[in-house]
Image (cartoon, grey):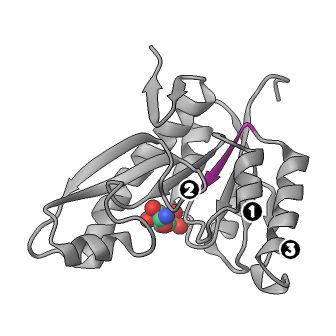
């Protein structure tokens, strides 16, 4: 590994298809950096298997074994501080990152959300979109701040919502875009191509 090579860690809770997209993009050299650790808050998350298959180190911090959020986040912070990655990617990580970690890693945490923010933040974004009756939805990669899916936006992709769509069919269409948009955002971030000015994130030429 080159001394100046950047590293990133990925936080997961479940299936890990976005993790897989980041793994593939790294293997192809599209992302220049190394994926140094995958952290899961859930035992048995399929994402852990994906990482193991690729010989990427994993760390399980089983949320249920902690006495509460504070203790869990203290352990998470200590793992993150030991690794000290350039970037932390949330990929299907089903918890809000606490204030201490957000401020310790300010503007170094990314999240992917399955809606066109600021519409439909929070859980079940695809269901919210279908039930609201929007004609267009999509996904958003953003920097994580203290709010729920409120941080500065790096990239978005739109998809149509058809009359015949179910939550599942819309989720599938959005997911395809997630797998394209997230690696691109990580590539830009690790390549120092992003300029953050308040809420605005500009891509440097
Ligand atoms: C994705 O839809 C992501 O946008 C959301 O949770 C889902 C995770 O999917 N935050 P996966 O675990 O990456 O397959």
Residue 101: image tag: none
Looking at the rendering, in which quadrant would you find the C terminus? top left
**In front of the other: label 1 or label 2?**
1
In what element is the residue under mark 1? strand
Front one among 56 and 137: 137
Where residue 185 sits: x, y (%)? 49, 38
Quarter of the image for residue 45 reads bottom right
Q: Are marks 2 and 3 in contact (CB under 8 Å)?
A: no
Q: Callout 3: few (<14), some (14-19), or many (20+) C-alpha neighbours within 10 Å?
A: few
Q: In this figure, which residue is indicated by the disc labeled 1?
A: 39
Where residue 106 sits: x, y (%)? 68, 42
Is residue 188 shown left or right of residue 156? right
Is the CB atom of the residue marked by disc 2 within 8 angstroms of ligand 1's nearest atom?
yes
Residue at the image point whose x is 80% and y is 22% from the top: 4
Q: In this figure, which residue is indicated by the disc labeled 3?
A: 71
Is residue 67 shown left or right of residue 24? right
Sequence-first tag of 2 and 3:
2
Q: In this figure, which residue is indicated by the disc labeled 2?
A: 20
In magenta, the rendered stretch is 86-90
Where residue 161 sits: x, y (%)? 16, 64
């Amino acid at each position: 590994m080159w001394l100046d090579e950047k590293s990133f860690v990925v936080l997961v809770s479940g299936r890990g298809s976005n993790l897989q997209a980041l793994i593939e993009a790294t293997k192809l050299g599209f992302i220049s950096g190394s994926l140094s650790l995958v952290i899961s808050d859930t035992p048995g998350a399929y994402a852990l298997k994906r990482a193991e298959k690729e010989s990427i180190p994993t760390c399980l911090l089983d949320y249920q074994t902690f006495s509460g959020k504070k203790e869990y986040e203290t352990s998470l912070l200590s793992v993150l501080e030991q690794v000290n990655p350039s970037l932390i990617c949330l990929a299907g990580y089903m918890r809000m990152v606490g204030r201490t970690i957000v401020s310790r890693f300010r503007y170094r945490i990314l999240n992917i959300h399955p809606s066109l923010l600021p519409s439909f933040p929070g859980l079940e974004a695809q269901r919210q979109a279908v039930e609201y009756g929007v004609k267009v939805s999509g996904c958003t990669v953003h920097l994580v701040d203290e709010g729920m899916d409120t941080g500065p936006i790096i990239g978005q992709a739109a998809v149509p919502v058809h009359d015949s769509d179910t939550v599942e069919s819309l989720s599938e269409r959005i997911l395809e875009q997630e797998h394209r948009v997230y690696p691109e955002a990580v590539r830009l971030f690790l390549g120092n191509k992003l300029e953050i000015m308040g809420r605005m994130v500009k891509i440097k030429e």
